[in-house]
């Protein structure tokens, strides 16, 4: 049997990492990755459930495969990730030609399940237990973290990697499906995390992004009762030679402790970018969302960050049009954005998620056109702030890790000597400059000459900074 695998991934960084892991695992079982569904005989969709729109897109992509499957019944079609856990058998009903459904806590079973399908054992389903389907321990064990050997060729760049430190979530915000799809919060064993980081460093990785739904709540207790927190982990990971940058996402406001901030300040490898979603600027809404903090608590956290890490850049998430949100509530969110001056904000329109507290107890009473307007209004305020704040970079020199050609650079001809390249600063600002494809993976000083709300534009800073010398330097590399 030929084993040509196509995988499509939507959703968060966790999903990107899960796909990397599944592909690495399947490669060890003789699969080769192909670029289009047409060439493949196994097609996997790694799915997201966080908003309805994401699910609709997947169901519509699946719908398009109905005929393909009729014509080629031997093709295997699989759905993995959060939607597989949430909808389970329903996927077989909505898309009867699907062969495989695998939740995010069962990914290690994929090779075996595919073998079963190939052996004619019929369609396969592997999902974790629901949050009330047994003892805490049994439920926990049914959500397994899946982190086999790392394969650098599976990553967008070989010099950057995600590293999972925590799975699941126990915060149960009323709008959110994640505690159901990804199960109970569990901190991975620190020794395993450090060993995996060492493997990544040995593979040439210079930047590691630690992943967790509430990454700064990370906690692991060993048999002797020794507790490891995120700050301890950062200290251990900082020791690894070769690793030059450590990032972590996503943070939970209440766990942004003084001790963690001081650790970041004292470890030069730690990124000063903090993604700490506020979700709303209204206490009433925060209560309905069951976020566990008030606006005053959030502002206190901002002051703590400002005091200990004045150079930090902070980004946030907001949900507009959540149940019961009045114009006044929304204005309070705008006020919060103006007061906090986030580097950027990710703004989402509330989408009812079956199985959540909000779907059972609160009415989705904000009309779609109001959600749209609030979404655009908040985005405009944030963009204005981002553009203003970026102005301070003009004339400054920033150090970036070059990631590769920018979107524009990717369209430029392969043979052109200068292409637009893109990289990021330690505080996660996107920087573009004209350079050379081979600079990907290097740390370069860039003198910023222009900015927009999303991007800094600059040129490589050289000791003898004249335009001719700069060109020679970048061409020579
Ligand atoms: N509707 C809209 N946005 C949501 N998010 C989570 N659940 C929902 C939902 N039901 C947003 C939150 C979270 C981000 C990842 O997605 O802002 O921080
Ligand atoms: Fe969802 Fe809240 Fe957990 Fe974030 S903290 S994953 S929003 S339940």
Image: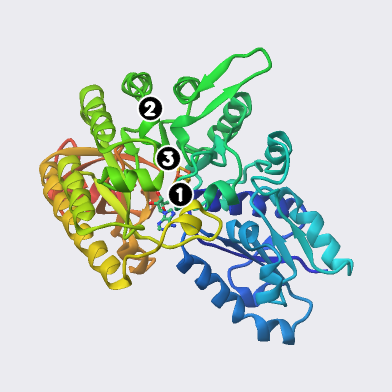
> Which sits in the foreground, 357 or 190?
357
Q: Secondary structure at mark 3?
A: strand
Q: Nearer the viewer, mark 3 or mark 2?
A: 3
Quadrant housing residue 89: bottom right
- Residue visible at 30% across and 65% down? 408
Q: Please indicate, yes or no, whether residue 203 appears anywhere in the rendered image.
A: no
- Can you give x and y, in whole percent of width and height, for residue 309 in the image? 25, 26
343 relative to 235, above or below: below
Q: Which residue carries the number 2 mark?
A: 269
Q: Distance between the Cα atoms at labels 3 and 2?
A: 15 Å
Q: Nearer the viewer, residue 459 or 326?
A: 326
Please tell me how crowded label 3 is: few (under 14), some (14-19), or many (20+) other residues with Cα within 10 Å. Answer: some
- Say which mark, if any, is on residue 291: none
Q: Position of residue 325 (x, y in %)?
A: 29, 57
> What mark, if any, has residue 249 been given in the picture?
3
- Between marks 3 and 1, how big is the CA–CA gap? 21 Å
Q: Which residue is mark 1?
A: 174
Characterize the local packing of mark 2: few (<14), some (14-19) or many (20 or more) Cα atoms within 10 angstroms: many
How crowded pointer 1 is (Cα within 10 Å; few <14, some 14-19, many 20+) is rated as many
Is residue 38 visible in this depiction of the protein? yes
Q: Residue at x 53, y 33 (%)?
A: 201
Q: Position of residue 305 (x, y in %)?
A: 26, 28
Instruction: Place residue 120 in its image quadrant.
Output: bottom right
Q: Position of residue 259 (x, y in %)?
A: 37, 18
**Which element type, helix, strand or loop, lies under badge 2?**
loop
The vertical placement of 278 against 84, above or below, is above
């Amino acid at each position: 049997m030929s084993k040509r695998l196509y995988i499509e991934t939507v959703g968060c960084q966790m999903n990107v990492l899960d796909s990397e892991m599944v592909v690495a695992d399947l490669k060890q079982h003789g699969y080769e990755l192909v670029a289009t569904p047409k060439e493949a005989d196994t097609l996997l969709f790694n799915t997201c459930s966080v908003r309805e729109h994401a699910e609709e897109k997947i169901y519509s992509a699946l719908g398009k495969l109905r005929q393909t499957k009729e014509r080629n019944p031997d093709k295997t079609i699989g759905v993995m990730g959060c939607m597989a856990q949430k909808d389970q058998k329903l996927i077989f009903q909505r898309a009867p030609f699907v062969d495989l459904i695998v939740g995010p806590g069962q990914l290690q079973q994929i090779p075996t399940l595919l073998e079963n399908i190939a052996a004619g054992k019929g369609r396969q389903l592997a999902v974790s237990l629901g949050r009330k389907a047994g003892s805490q321990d049994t439920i926990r064990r049914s959500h397994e973290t899946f982190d086999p050997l790392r394969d650098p060729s599976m990553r967008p760049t070989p010099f950057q990697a995600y590293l999972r430190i925590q799975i699941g979530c126990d915060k149960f915000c009323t709008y959110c499906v994640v505690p159901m799809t990804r199960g109970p919060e569990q901190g991975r064993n620190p020794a395993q995390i450090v060993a995996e980081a060492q493997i990544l460093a040995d593979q040439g990785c210079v930047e590691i992004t630690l992943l967790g739904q509430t990454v700064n709540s990370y906690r692991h207790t060993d048999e002797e009762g020794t507790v490891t927190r995120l700050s301890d982990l950062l200290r251990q990971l900082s020791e690894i030679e070769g690793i030059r940058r450590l990032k972590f996402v996503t943070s939970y406001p209440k766990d942004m402790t003084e001790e963690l901030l001081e650790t970041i300040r004292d470890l030069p490898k730690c990124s000063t970018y903090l993604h700490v979603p506020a979700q709303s600027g209204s206490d009433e809404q925060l209560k309905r969302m069951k976020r566990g903090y008030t606006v005053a608590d959030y502002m206190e956290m901002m002051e703590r960050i400002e005091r200990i890490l004045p150079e930090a850049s902070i980004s946030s998430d907001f949900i507009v049009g959540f149940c019961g949100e009045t114009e006044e509530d929304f204005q309070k969110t705008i006020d919060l954005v103006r007061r906090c001056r986030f580097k950027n904000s990710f703004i989402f329109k509330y989408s009812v998620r079956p199985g959540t507290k909000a779907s059972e107890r609160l009415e989705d009473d904000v009309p779609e056109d109001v959600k749209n307007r609030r979404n655009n209004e908040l985005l405009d305020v944030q963009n204005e702030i981002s553009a203003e704040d970026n102005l301070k970079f003009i004339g400054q020199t920033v150090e970036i890790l070059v990631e590769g050609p920018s979107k524009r650079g990717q369209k430029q001809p392969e043979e052109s000597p200068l292409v637009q390249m893109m990289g990021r600063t330690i505080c996660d600002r996107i920087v573009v400059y004209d350079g050379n494809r081979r600079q990907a993976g290097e740390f370069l000083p860039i003198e910023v000459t222009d900015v927009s709300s999303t991007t800094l534009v600059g040129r490589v800073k050289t000791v003898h900074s004249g335009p001719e010398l700069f060109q020679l330097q970048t061409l020579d590399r």
